[in-house]
Each structure stands twice: as structure tokens, then as C-alpha cells.
Image: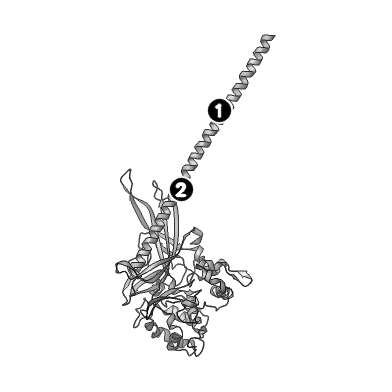
Amino acid sequence: MKRAAAYHLQSATRGFALVITLALLALLMLAVLALGTLARVSSRIAATSKFQTQARQHALLGLETALGALQQYAGGDDRITAMAGVTGVSAGASSATRHWCGVWTTTGGFVGWLVSGAEPGSSAAIQSGLARLALVSTGSVGAPAANSEHVDVGKWPIEVIDPLSGRRRVDGNFAYWVGDEGVKISAYAPDAELALAGVHPVLGSNPATSATAKLGLALATYGAKLPRVVTYEQLGLLPTPGAPLVASVLQDSFHHTTLTSRGLVSTGGGPVLRAGIFNPNTTSQIAWRGLLETYNSTAAGPPIAAIALGTSPVTSLPARIANNLALAGEAGKLPNGPFLTVAAFAGSGLLSTALAASGSGVTPEELITGIGPLLAVRSDTFRVRAGGEVLDPVDEATVRAVAYVEAIVQRVPAAAPNALGRRFRIIHFRWLGLDDL
């Protein structure tokens, strides 16, 4: 009896020890599995961080390349800038190169496009065989449409030598676009920097339902807040009377309105920066409407009569100028090219014919008297966007990470090194997400 009890006790003890052992083994296996999972996750996080850092480096390479091209092509005083619309690229959802910025000499020679992957000639086209990248897309302008075109550029491959195989492979891509802010109407021009005392740029307000009219209402109502606004995108924080600005207002105005366009103006003491400068080398009806409304509002040499602008996209005064600007060819302007001087624009048949058709009686001389100091046929303020991609080391068809960057760049009076004209200065910098493009 005693032996049987002892046997049962010993068996129970051994059974309990087995259960404990199995439980400990299960916990050990669970710990090993958890450590393995943690190691894999940490490895993936490290790889993702590495790829993202590489993508940012590629984007910064695009930005540096863009700044170099801008300095080389447009640093000198003997340069003209214009949007690609002046070469005949029409408004439309598929016109993804209309808002490229081109550079010409003061004698009319084409210098180049300030985008990656462009054909070398004055035709705004991406080189055959290059993949495209959209650097202005839904986040900036909404769905593609006339006057809200997306902007595509060509991607340049970045090649490296694989240290293990010794073969050349594509490690990633970069791309860039330089946008001309001078062909837009300024939303804000500080009093102390006005090119024409007392004359502030006016955003087009007709029709009243237009995006620029809604934005202009917000600017007029909350003008005291504008000195604290740093970027165009921050204008979206301004409410309209009774309601905030919806995203589409800024999107629809993106290609036609900038926060502040500053240009170098010659004075007795040398060139100085002035705000609200407008470059007439644009085919944007919306920007032209703003400029002509600025004339109607000016008190400097007041107009004999306000110009009748009209609202038709074909027969209105802004339309007559914008729609025919590319075709106009005369002294100081080649067909499908920019005006080379403000005087050439002032004396052009394009302007005189359009004003006469408006029936307002305002002459080109009166128009130039009213707003001439605001005009310059080159721009000095630019928006630069660049993108970078990193490809999988094994499968080059797989993109592992992307990054986008933007800078607002201002040309300043100081001389650049190596006889490259005047310096460009970054006045604002930010990283972009996909939703910002």
C-alpha cells in the first residue's frame, strides 16, 4: 500500500515536471520566434530608412541640377524667360508641357528649357525613350484640365557600378522642373517694395464665381494677415467671409497666381528687388485678366476709361491677347517665341488690335503709362520642384522609395561666380508628399 502510494506520487511528480518542461520549451520557442520577427522587422525598417534616405539624396541631386541650370541659363541680365505656351502649346488637359519655363537671349536665340529630359530645341517636348514623372499633379492643380494642366518632365537615370558583380546598373532616377512665377499675378506685394507706388496687383474678379475672384475676396478681407504668409499654399489658411477657402480655389489658381513675384528693377543706385512684377510672356487668360484689372484699378496716371474686359474665352480682351500671343510675329518678337522687350510688347499689333476690339478707347500708350513699371520680359522668381526614386538592387523595375522637394528661388542683385550673371537665393524650402504634388 505504501509502495503504491509512493509510486503514484513519483509518477505525478514526473508528469508535473514534464508539463513544466514543455511549457518552458514553448516559451523558449515563442521568445526565439519573437526575436526572429523583431530582427526581420528591424531589418526591413533599416532597409526602408536606407532607401528613403537615398531617395531624398536623389531628389536633392535633382534640385541642385535644377539650380545649376537656372544659374547657367537665366543668371545673366541678357536673358528672357517665358512659359512654353508662347511656343504654341495650347491650353488643355493633355498639354503637360505648357507650363515649362524656357530661356531665350535678348536677340531671340533659344537657350533651353528648365526641366529634366527636354528635347534640345524650342519645341517643348520630352526626349524619346525617357520615362515621365509628374511634378505638378492633382495635389497642386486638381484633375488635369485647360488652365489646370499637370506638368510632366523626363526622368534621368542614376547609374552605379555594383561592387560585387562589377556591372553597371541603374540605382534610381531624378527629375526636376523650374516654374516661372513671374508670369503670374502676385497675391501680395508689400507697400515698401511696390514697383509702382500705390499700385497693388489685382487678381481677376470677373466672373465673381471664379477661383481667383474667391481668392481675391479672402485677400482683401484678411489683408492684415498677409505679411505673415510665407508661401502660396499658406493662403489656403485664410477664410473667406463666412467660410474657409476650399482646396480647389488654390488649385485652380496655381498656374496663374503666386504669393509674391519679385523682379530686379534698374535704379540710379543699381538693380533693386521690387514686388508685383509681371512677365507678359504668358498665354494665361487668367493672369492677363488680373493685369488688365490692375490697370483699371490704378491711380497712377488714371486711365481715361476702364477697359471693357469681357468674359468670353474667345473675344474678351484677355483672350484676344493670350490666345494670339504665340502666333504674333513682329519687331521684337518671333512667331512662337517671347517678346524680347517691354517696348516691343507696347508697340505690338497684338496689343493695339486687342485694345481696339475692346471698344474702350484705351490706347497702348495709356495702358503702358498706367502699368508699364510693373512689366518685365524676364522673371526673377521661380518655383523649383525635384523628385528622386530608388530602384530595387535586384529588380530595377521595382521602385523602393520616392522623395520630392520644392524650393522658391529668388534672383538677387549680387553677382554670381564664374561670370554667370546674378546669384539665385533659396527663400523657402520644403519636402513634399505625394498629396502635395
Q: Nearer the viewer, residue 142 or 70?
A: 70
The three-letter code of the residue at mark 2 reads Thr
Q: Position of residue 115 (x, y in %)?
A: 38, 65
Position of residue 198 measured from the top left corner of the image (x, y, whole percent): 50, 82
Identified at 45% across, 56% down, the residue is 403
199 versus 225 height, above or below: below
Give me the C-alpha separation between circle 2 and circle 1: 34 Å
- Report crowding for label 1: few under 14, some 14 to 19, many 20 or more residues within 10 A (C-alpha): few
Apparent side of residue 305 relative to residue 70 in the rendered image (left or right): right
Q: Residues within 10 Å of mark 2 (few under 14, many from 20)?
A: some
Badges 2 and 1: C-beta atoms under 8 Å apart? no
Q: Secondary structure at mark 1?
A: helix
Q: Is residue 8 left or right of residue 339?
A: right
> Amino acid type of disc 1?
Leu
Residue at 45% in and 85% down:
354
Q: Residue under label 2, please give it.
A: 48
Label 1 sits on residue: 25
Callout 2 secondary element: helix
Res. 154 in view: no
Query: What is the residue that sits farthest to the front in this orientation?
Result: 269
Image mark for residue 179? none
In percent of width and height, residue 44 lies at 47, 44
In the rendered structure, the answer to whether residue 408 lies left or right of residue 210 reads left
Q: Earlier in the sequence, mark 2 or mark 1?
A: 1
Can I make out residue 34 in this image?
Answer: yes
Task: Report the quarter where the N terminus lies.
Answer: top right
Residue 129 vs residue 245, the one in the foreground: 245
